[in-house]
Amino acid sequence: MLKFLTDAVEKNASDIFIIPGLPLSYKINGKIIPVDDNKLMPADSEALITALYELSNHRSMDKLHTYGDDDLSCSIKGVARFRVSIMKQRGSLAAVIRVVHFEIPRPEDMNIPPEVIRTANLKKGLVLVTGAAGSGKSTTLACIIDEINRTRNSHIITLEDPIEYLHRHNRSVVTQREIGLDTDSYVNGLVASLRQAPDVILLGEMRDFDTIKTAMTAAETGHLVISTLHTIGSANSIDRIIDVFPPDGQQQIRVQLAMVLQAVISQQLVPTVTGGMVPAFEIMFLNDAIRTMVREGKIHQIDNVIATSMAEGMISMNNSLLRLMREGKISRDTCISYSSDPEQMQMRLM
């Protein structure tokens, strides 16, 4: 297993796939490429996955055998860290491994715009980083936390499942806790963190009603809470939070959200003309107009405000894609296909 992990890092793979019936494969520049022609048998997959548990401080496999899924992280000194998602499929074991480099990348090297890193200046409220799985949310979060760590004297608590980037203490004190290892759930870790003098709380994911409710309360009581959702677009992200609550509580949550929400950063990875990947961003900062729309349930009007508020640092997904196309990074077809409104994009390109 060590050989494959090291080889994947050397080939700049983003993911490693261990799937019975297929060769072990790497994802490089968005394409899944087999390592060789040797298909993995169930026994081969189980041996590789058992080795991953041994790399992860001999972690127990009980959760995997009981529930059919498990997440863990492991590292190879001097090579990289790895985030591992393991599952049962058709009675055998499979895994997808994300490669996470030790060094926190520089935002400019990852094409993360300064407007995103600007959220590190916020002192309280809720910041959401949203996008589909594999869209680069973890890297964006790491860059924001690193900026806070370098520039502010704060206590930063992270709750992650699992921990990906390791943050060394700089100007701030950074406490990193892993779900399942250091605390049993996001909501319990979040409740405990409120008694640990935090200034900034990174919540790996707002998965359910209890976690979202507790995160909103933490943001309301003067903490900066940064978290993620698997949604695309600011309006969809706001609707997702509101829909988690029962109908008779949704107006109250709209009012609360209008007060505490500070920014929504939505991102997707887009293929470049050179065969790589580049992130496209929608960036929304809450101004008076958007707060009123959230409070009054006029979420569908938010996209228009984002598109016309570039002076306030906002950018729509369409404008971000157009910028990438005009810089020669992505093709016209890619610009259209990754747009949230392909017909409108086609009209703008005529």
Image (tube, rainbow, N blue to C red):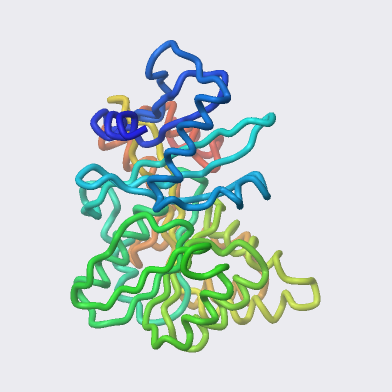
**Total marks in image:** 0
Where residue 67 appears, x then y in whole percent?
67, 49
Q: Quadrant of the N terminus?
A: top left
272 on left or right of 86:
left
- Can residue 318 be spotted in the picture? no
Please name the residue shown 54% across and 41% down the image: 86
In this view, 220 is above or below 167: below
Q: Is residue 252 left or right of residue 56?
A: right
Please provide percent x and percent y for residue 26.
Answer: 39, 27
Can you say whether 270 is above or below 274 in the image? below
Q: Who's the residue at 71% across and 64% down the image? A: 243
For the C terminus, the image quarter is top left
Q: Residue at x 33, y 61 (%)?
A: 116
Indicate the position of residue 163 as horizontal and vertical percent values: 40, 58
- Residue furthest toward the right? 248
Q: Nearer the viewer, residue 120 or 114?
A: 120
Could you tell me which residue is drawn at 55 percent across and 25 percent down? 43
Q: Nearer the viewer, residue 326 or 233?
A: 233
Residue 13: where, in percent of width, then height? 33, 32
Residue 274 visible in this rendered orientation of the protein? yes
